[in-house]
Amino acid sequence: MSITLTDAIETLNAMANTRKMEDADWVRALNFSLKEHRSKFILPWAQRRTQLLVYPNVVKYASPSDMDFPHLPQKLANSENTDDGWFQGRTQKSFARRRDATERALAIDWERDTKYLLVRYPDAASEALLHNLDDHDANGTWTAGGDASAVATDTGTAFEGAGSVRFTITNSAASATLTNSDMAAVDLTDFKNRCRVFFSLDVPVAGLTAVAIRWGSSASAYWEVTGIATQFHGAGIAGAAWNLFSANWTSAITESGSPDAAAVNYVRVTFTNGATSANYHLDHIVFRRYKELELPYSSKNLVLDANGTLYKEELAVNTTDTITGDDAWDNLILHSAVKWAAKYVLKDRDLFLVASTDEKETIRNLKTVYPSAVMRPSISYYPRSLL
C-alpha cells in the first residue's frame, strides 16, 4: 500500500532493465501517469467531502481547489435528514438549456483552467428582496455620489427582472457610490447574521477593483462589508460582463449605530477604481439563506510529501514523496511510467509493447475493484425551434 519515490525509481529501473534514465525523467513519467489514470476510477484514497452551501436562484459556485471531479451532492448524513434530494449529472450545455425549476442538477463549468460547479437545487432556503432596481425612482430614489453621476432607469439591460439602474462613472477620486435612503422598509429579522446579501453589477470596462455595500435603518445606522474583490463563485471582477457579488452577513461584519433589522430602508453601494464609462448597471439586491449539502469529490492530490502531512498533485525530484494507493494502483502507475519512458526517452519498441500489455492488464484488474469515475450526464434534446 503506497510506494515512495525512491522505491518507485528503483523498481522502474529494474522493470526497464536500464540505468539510462535520469531520476528527473522518471519523475516526469510518474507524474504523467498519475494525471492520465486518476480520473478513470473512483479511488478510495482520493475521496474527500466538503460543505456545499446552496442559495436560492444562484447556480455558479466555487469548486474545491484540489477537486479532480465531483460526485453528486447529498444531504448531510444525520438522524434528521432523509436524502431524498437525488441529483442529476448534466453537461454544461444541457444544464444551461434545461431551466427546470424542479430539477436537482449538477454540472461542471470551465473558465480558462478553473473548474466551477453549476448547481440547481429547488429545495434551497428562503430569500428576501431588498430592492429589485427595475427603476431608479419607483421605490425610493437612487442618487449618485463621488465619481458617479447620471443615474437613470434602463429597461433594455437587466440581470433579472424588468430593468436595472444605469449610471456613469468618471474616474477622478477612485470612488463612486449609489445610495437609496427612502425606499420601503424591509423586515430582515429572520436573515440577520445567517445569510448572504447578493447584488449584480454590469461592469462595462475593466478597472474596477472592489465594491462595498451598506444596509440599515439610516445613513448613521447600518451594517457594512467592504473590500469585496471577487465574484461570489471566486472569479475576479470581469469587465464587459455582469458580475454577481456577495457578502456574508454575520456578527463579525462592521455595524455602525443601532440599525434595526426589522425595518431596513437604507442601502449604499460603493465602487472602487471603476474606469470611466456611461454604462454601469446595478441590479437586484437580495438576501438569501442557504441549505447545507455535502459534496463528495475525488481529489487530484494523490502524492503525500516527505513529512506525511501535505497531499499534492505531483512528485518532486530528489524527495521522499509517496504515491498513495494500493498495490494494484502502484503497479498501474509503474507500468504506465515504463511505457512513457520507452516511447519518449528510451525509444525502445519492445519495451513499449511489453509495458503497454502490462498496463492494459492492470487496468482490467482495477476495473473489477473500483468503478469508473465518469459522472454520466443526462442530456435532454429539444426541437431546434425551441432552442
Image (spheres, rainbow, N blue to C red):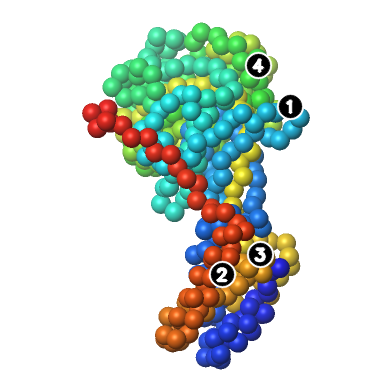
Q: Is residue 49 visible?
A: yes
Q: Residue at x 53, y 42 (%)?
A: 62
Q: CA distance from mark 4 to mark 1?
A: 22 Å
Which label was assigned to residue 44?
Answer: none
The kind of residue tagged 1 is Glu
Q: Residues within 10 Å of mark 1 (few under 14, many from 20)?
A: few
Which label was assigned to residue 325?
Answer: 3
N-terminal of the pair, mark 3 or mark 2, is 3
Q: CA distance from mark 4 to mark 2?
A: 57 Å
From what the image shows, is residue 207 above or below residue 2? Answer: above
Nearest the eye: 117 or 72: 72
Q: CA distance from mark 1 to mark 3?
A: 35 Å
Q: Residue at x 65, y 55 (%)?
A: 44
* Numbered disc 1: secondary structure: loop
Q: Is residue 224 visible?
A: no
From what the image shows, is residue 53 above or below residue 10? Answer: above
Which label was assigned to residue 190?
Answer: 4
* Numbered disc 2: secondary structure: helix
CB contact under 8 Å: marks 4 and 3:
no
Nearest the eye: 233 or 337: 337
Residue on which the image places disc 2: 362
CB contact under 8 Å: marks 3 and 2:
no
Q: Residue furthest right?
A: 79
Residue on which the image places disc 1: 80
The kind of residue tagged 4 is Asp
N-terminal of the pair, mark 4 or mark 2, is 4
Horizontal and vertical percent position of residue 35:
51, 64
Q: Is residue 293 left or right of residue 20?
A: right
